[in-house]
């Protein structure tokens, strides 16, 4: 199966281009100015050779029968003064073309950057709304590529490529019009080499297109390989896999180098080939014009002008050929970007969302069935209720569906059958943002963002006061650690909390949940990755956190949930047992077997922790 980077797409797709140009609509006034500047610059491109023709035919090699020009009344009869006047006009034309080109390039780059800023903002907002199921099936590197590399390809097209294409077409059109007016036969000689130019261009396009496809694929593979192996560097070094990994990377890197070599070869022969054809056309012009000048039917000024127009004629053709690949890459990138933007957001607020129930609210799972794919059921006919203020633990073997219960409760996924209600209201009738605002969640692997400790606790929530912040930290026994840091709450946190222990990151995660003062608390394997000493501290923190709140605790370590009000035992997607610790032990079922495997002896050694969870 091909990866998305391998799909080239059409060279031009009107539907995609119209949608892409829609990002320029807010800046259409600036774009209109750019078009005017581009038109003026293109006109000035053809003025120079005409002025040269006038200088030659009027002063350097005068032609008595020369047709009058609009400038004749303003030019001096004195050759020196006349040449100075024409030279001044030529200089003004060059300066004007320079200023127009600069202003147009600056404004289009400004417009392109703002349009891509809007596009990246839209992509990020859409990524934040997409369901977790999308992230389950989509590699992170691919999403990063959409927001970075693909957007850059579009920026290059909008900011310079599209304008350059329009400018080259305008310049080419004006040059051909003026040449036809000066001499149709000489224009025909220039156009005679066009079939060969087209043939060379087609061969170049095919070669360059394949090279760019291979480059794109190689870059995607390099990014994917680096992301996987840098994140797994500890395992790589632990099993002495450096040499093998280096060999694999060398092969991927070599493919990238070979693809670039092909592109370099294509450009190396394309430009000289077009230059050769251009020189061949100019040589034919010189031969033809020599006979015509001797006959007196052609002036030297026309020949000089044609030589200059010849260079202006072939340069846009070269540019257009190069922009072909840019246009194709942009079309492929836009197709991938819009495919992401068109990915439907399945889990969103209903048209008339209900308000979250006020006061104590009962959580109810009513005959819930759920599968991540098709009918591979992860949960089967699960029903239970959690009363307000009750602490309920969920245990079971790996894959029993424990974490899935939480994902459904927070509406990261929607159930296929049955319903989940809070306070009698189906959660599908609530705004997901409003629903999640009432839950504090501590995950098995705490995720910290780059920033500060305070920023990781607040997560942008402005209404959390300093007193509430300090109180939350104190309740999870983290205040002494923060006070020992040089910058306290402002201590910088590196990516994913690098430099902090697992226990410290977990306690920060606890403080984050507590500072937001949630009505419901969810702890998903919150102590599975900490040592015994940290676990005791976590258990003490949990006892304070669950007080006065409805709490759901998922745990492998049964020592942390023995004092829960009720324990639910999941097995192969079904709810098999429910009761207190002692009731479940007396039943000698699945829970009793789990207990026998884990904590029968440890229970006597663990210190009391009040109402631990």
Image (tube, rainbow, N blue to C red):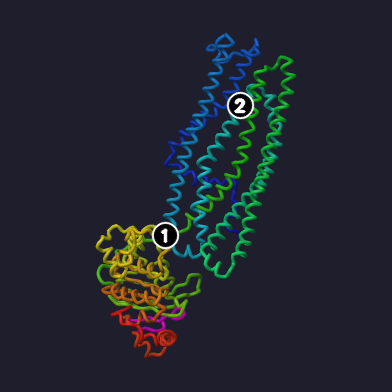
- Report whether 291 appears left or right of 593: right
CB atoms at circles 2 and 1 under 8 Å apart?
Answer: no
Which SS does the magenta portion mostly show? strand
Report x, y in % for residue 66. 63, 13
Res. 177 mark = 2
Q: Quadrant of the C terminus?
A: bottom left
Q: Name the quadrant containing residue 295.
A: top right
Measure the C-alpha gap from mark 2 to mark 1. 63 Å
Q: Is residue 55 above or below residue 209?
A: above
Labels 2, 1: front one? 1
Q: Is residue 532 above or below residue 592?
A: above
Residue 132 location in percent, x, y?
Answer: 45, 64
Magenta stretch in the rendered image: 565-579
Pick the residue in front: 452 or 138: 452
Q: Which residue is mark 1?
A: 494
The local secondary structure at tag 1 comes to loop
Asked whether residue 499 is drawn in magenta, I would say: no
Depicted 310 relative to depicted 81: above or below: below
Vertical placement of 248 versus 609: above or below? above
Instruction: Report how many numbered discs are placed on residues in the image.
Output: 2
* Mark 1 burial class by Cα count in 10 Å: few <14, some 14-19, many 20+: some
Residue 439 visible somewhere in the drawing:
no
Looking at the rendered image, the quarter that the N terminus falls into is: bottom right
Front residue (pair 335, 488) = 488
Mark 2 and mark 1 lie on one chain; the one further toward the N terminus is 2
């Amino acid at each position: 199966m091909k990866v998305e980077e391998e799909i080239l797409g059409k060279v031009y797709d009107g539907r995609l281009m119209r949608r892409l140009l829609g990002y320029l609509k807010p800046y259409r006034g600036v774009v209109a100015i750019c078009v005017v500047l581009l038109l003026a610059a293109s006109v000035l491109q053809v003025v120079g050779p005409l002025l040269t023709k006038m200088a030659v035919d009027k002063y350097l090699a005068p032609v008595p029968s020369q047709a009058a020009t609009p400038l004749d009344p303003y030019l001096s009869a004195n050759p020196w003064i006349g040449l100075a006047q024409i030279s001044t006009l030529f200089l003004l034309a060059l300066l004007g073309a320079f200023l127009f080109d600069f202003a147009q390039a600056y404004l289009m780059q400004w417009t392109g950057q703002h349009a891509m800023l809007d596009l990246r903002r839209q992509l990020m907002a859409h990524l934040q709304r997409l369901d977790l199921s999308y992230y389950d099936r989509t590699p992170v590197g691919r999403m990063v590529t959409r927001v970075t590399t693909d957007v850059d390809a579009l920026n290059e097209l909008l900011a310079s490529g599209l304008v350059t294409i329009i400018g080259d077409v305008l310049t080419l059109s004006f040059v051909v019009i003026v040449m036809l007016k000066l001499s149709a036969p000489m224009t025909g000689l220039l156009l005679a080499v066009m079939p060969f130019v087209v043939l060379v261009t087609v061969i170049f396009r095919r070669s360059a297109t394949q090279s760019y496809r291979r480059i794109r694929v190689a870059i995607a593979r390099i990014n994917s390989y680096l992301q996987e192996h840098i994140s797994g560097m500890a395992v790589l070094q632990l099993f002495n896999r450096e040499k093998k990994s280096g060999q694999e990377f060398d092969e991927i890197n070599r493919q990238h180098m070979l693809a670039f070599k092909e592109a370099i070869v294509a450009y190396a022969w394309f430009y000289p080939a077009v230059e050769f054809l251009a020189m061949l056309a100019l040589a034919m012009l010189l031969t033809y014009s020599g006979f015509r000048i001797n006959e007196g039917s052609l002036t030297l000024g026309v020949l000089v002008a044609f030589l200059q127009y010849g260079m202006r004629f072939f340069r846009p053709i070269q540019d257009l050929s190069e922009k072909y690949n840019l246009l194709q890459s942009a079309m492929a990138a836009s197709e991938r970007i819009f495919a992401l933007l068109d990915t439907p957001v399945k889990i969103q607020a209903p048209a008339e969302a209900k308000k979250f129930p006020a006061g104590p609210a009962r959580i109810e799972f009513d005959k819930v069935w759920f599968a991540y794919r098709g009918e591979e059921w992860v949960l089967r006919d699960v029903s239970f209720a959690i009363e307000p203020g009750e602490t309920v633990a969920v245990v079971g073997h790996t894959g029993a569906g424990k974490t899935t219960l939480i994902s459904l409760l927070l509406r990261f996924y929607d159930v296929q059958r049955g319903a989940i209600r809070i306070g009698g209201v189906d959660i599908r009738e609530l705004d997901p943002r409003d629903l999640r605002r009432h839950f504090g969640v501590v995950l098995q692997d705490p995720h910290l963002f780059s920033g500060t400790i305070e920023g990781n606790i607040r997560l942008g929530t402005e209404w959390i006061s300093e007193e509430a912040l300090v109180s939350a930290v104190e309740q999870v026994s983290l205040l002494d650690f923060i006070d020992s840091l040089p910058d306290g709450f402002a201590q910088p946190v590196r990516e994913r909390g690098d430099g902090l222990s697992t226990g410290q990151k977990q306690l920060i995660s606890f403080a984050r949940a507590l500072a937001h003062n949630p009505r419901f608390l969810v702890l998903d394997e919150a102590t599975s990755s900490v040592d015994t000493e940290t676990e005791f501290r976590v258990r003490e923190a949990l006892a304070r956190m669950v007080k006065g709140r409805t709490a759901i605790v998922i745990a492998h370590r049964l020592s942390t949930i023995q004092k829960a009000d009720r324990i639910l035992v999941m097995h192969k997607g079904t709810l098999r047992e429910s009761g207190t610790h002692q009731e479940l032990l007396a039943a000698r079922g699945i829970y009793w077997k789990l207990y026998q495997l884990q904590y029968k002896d440890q229970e006597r050694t663990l210190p009391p922790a009040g109402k631990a969870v």
